[in-house]
Image: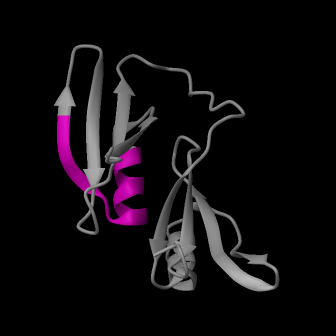
Amino acid sequence: MAKIIHSMVRVMNEQKSLDFYQNAFGLEIADRFQFDDFTLVYLRNSENDFEVELTINHGRVEPYVHGDGYGHIAVAVEDLDAEHARMTSHGFDVTPVKEFLRDGVLLARFFFVKDPDGYKTEVLQRHGRYR
């Protein structure tokens, strides 16, 4: 059986990305590996061992193009409204909270927040299958 261990995003500015992921989700540096042409930074928190891998390609000057196939990472939180307010107060690019119903029953409450490179993270209220 395979174990999912990380998701990678390419970022332009290491410090801006570190600040975002630390302030938005409490992620801290688990490992950092610098090579001649690129740096890999692995971020995680105490909730689990899944990591976000930041890839910084040295010398890159043009922003990355996500294309029309990029998805997102999702996290679950205890108090969605408080997290939305907190992230808004940090000046992060957040969407309004939405409710997703199926057959009249609440499936999910969520919003999206963008990191400095435009990658979206879905923030879900812990509920039902999203725990």
Magenta-colored stretch includes residue 44:
no
Quadrant of the drawing holding the C terminus: bottom left
Total count of labels: 0
* Image position of 48 with respect to 51: above or below: below
Q: Point out residue 50 in the picture as x, y percentages from the top left corner.
A: 31, 54
Q: Point out residue 74 in the picture as x, y percentages from the top left corner.
A: 51, 59
Residue projecting furthest to the front = 1
* Image position of 26 with respect to 19: above or below: below
User: Residue 98's image quarter?
Assistant: bottom right
78 relative to 104 in the view: left or right: left
Q: Toward the viewer: 114 or 50?
A: 50
Residue projecting furthest to the right = 103
* Image position of 114 with respect to 104: above or below: above
Identify the residue at horizontal 18%, vertical 31% (top origin).
Answer: 33
Q: Point out residue 108 in the picture as x, y percentages from the top left corner.
A: 65, 76
Identify the residue at horizontal 50%, vertical 80% (top origin).
Answer: 126
Magenta-colored stretch includes residue 23:
yes
Q: Point out residue 105 in the picture as x, y percentages from the top left corner.
A: 74, 85
Q: Toward the viewer: 122 or 131?
A: 131
Q: Which residues are magenta?
A: 17-32
112 relative to 46 in the view: left or right: right
98 relative to 5 in the view: left or right: right
Identify the residue at horizontal 23%, vertical 67% (top origin).
Answer: 46
